[in-house]
Amino acid sequence: METDNKIVITVEVTVNAPMAKVWDYWTKPTHITQWCNASDDWHAPYAENDLNINGKFKTTMAAKDGSMSFDFEGVYTNIREHKLIEYTILDGRKVRITFSQPDDEQTQIVETFDAEDINPFEMQQAGWQSILDNFKKYTEAN
């Protein structure tokens, strides 16, 4: 996924859970608030999600000590249930998430996104991978 010579980053994980559960936990706000953080000192106190083409989502990410927060927001551009989610973040960057099933009890998630220009590539990759790892941990534990 190349867009205007931007750096594109890919993170991935295999979750030991069936596709229906993975999709549910990925898309429902009650679950999003439980896993969408890159480190233990952050959390997601609020999430909304209109999973439709042109639907909007917003997840508030906040430091647990109250020192900082921001809203991660975007608009869906393509959705194929149990297969694909594509969206544009409000700053114009594109994200593509694919879901596949190596077998009935595992789901692979591959997330590809345009890098932003402020933080180093490695920091962005580590942050998004950490969120994906938190998703895996939460989904497998529940």
Image (spheres, helix red, strand yellow):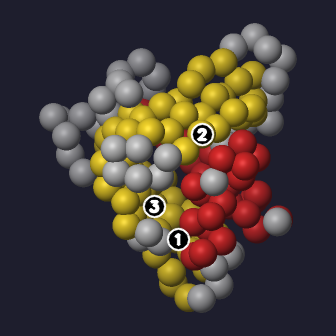
Q: Quadrant of the C terminus?
A: bottom right
Mark earlier in primary sequence (3, 2): 2
Amino acid type, label 1: Gln
Q: Which residue is mark 3?
A: 110
Give how far across and how far down residue 111 sits, in percent.
44, 54
Q: Residue at x 71, y 24 (%)?
A: 62
Secondary structure, mark 1, is: strand
Q: In the shown orientation, is residue 56 left or right of residue 114?
A: right
Q: In the shown orientation, is residue 10 left or right of residue 58?
A: left
Q: Any mark on residue 48, and which?
A: 2
Picture layout, residue 102 above or below residue 74: below
Q: Residue at x 42, y 18 (%)?
A: 118
- Count of labels in the image: 3
Q: Are marks 1 and 3 in contact (CB under 8 Å)?
A: yes
Would you identify the image quadrant in which residue 58 lies?
A: top right
Q: Nearer the viewer, residue 12 or 28?
A: 28
